[in-house]
Amino acid sequence: MTEFTIRKAKIDDEAAILEIFNYYVKSSYAAYSEEPEGSRFFNRLWQIATGYPFYIAETVEGKVVGFALLHAYYGIPVFQRAARITYFIHYDYTRQGLGRLFLDRLTVDAIAMGIDCIMASISSLNEPSIKFHERNGFVECGRFKRIGRKLDTDFDEVWMQKLL
């Protein structure tokens, strides 16, 4: 099994983050975008993560193989105890424990920040992600039927929640 190092994301990670994300844009329903993203998307990620943890996973050789972040669920004080989680892992490194490593790290950070509810928005066509979240204590708390359409296929947006 590959060993990973988790570190804070840096501006210099833009190209690696976009490469990982854009793979899912082109090949799956995990990313909601229909066209590959660029600097504008990365800058938006960087902005929404302000004040929240934003991490990179690297191999021992220094290859960036994933990213994960928390961000505000709804950006107003009454919802400050909730955060959304986002993570994407390089396709060659899935099913190696990296998702769990990210989730554990972000959970510790969330608790330290006073966050006691983590939310995940997942395409209904991304069954592996739904199963991963279920195995890790998330429960489905909402579903917007047929709200999305990508690659000529309709899908639901599934909301999952984990209370800490």
Image: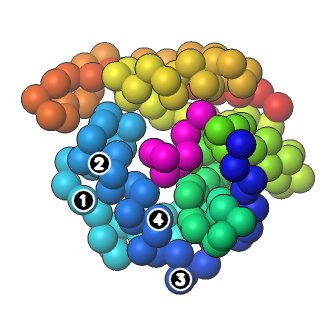
The residue positioned farthest toward the bottom in the image shown: 12
Identified by mark 2, the residue type is: Val
> How many numbered discs?
4
Q: Distance between the Cα atoms at labels 4 and 2?
A: 12 Å
Q: Is residue 36 left or right of residue 66?
A: left
Identify the secondary structure beneath mark 2: helix
Crowding near the residue tagged with mark 1, few <14, some 14–19, many ≥20 C-alpha atoms within 10 Å:
some
Q: Quadrant of the C terminus?
A: top right
- Which of disc 4 and disc 3 is earlier in sequence? 3
Residue highlighted by disc 3 = 12
Residue highlighted by disc 1 = 36
Name which residue lies at 60% across and 25% down. Answer: 132
The magenta segment is 89-95
Name which residue lies at 89% across and 53% down. Answer: 112
Identify the secondary structure beneath mark 4: helix
Q: Distance between the Cα atoms at labels 3 and 4?
A: 10 Å
Crowding near the residue tagged with mark 3, few <14, some 14–19, many ≥20 C-alpha atoms within 10 Å:
few
- Which of disc 3 and disc 1 is earlier in sequence? 3
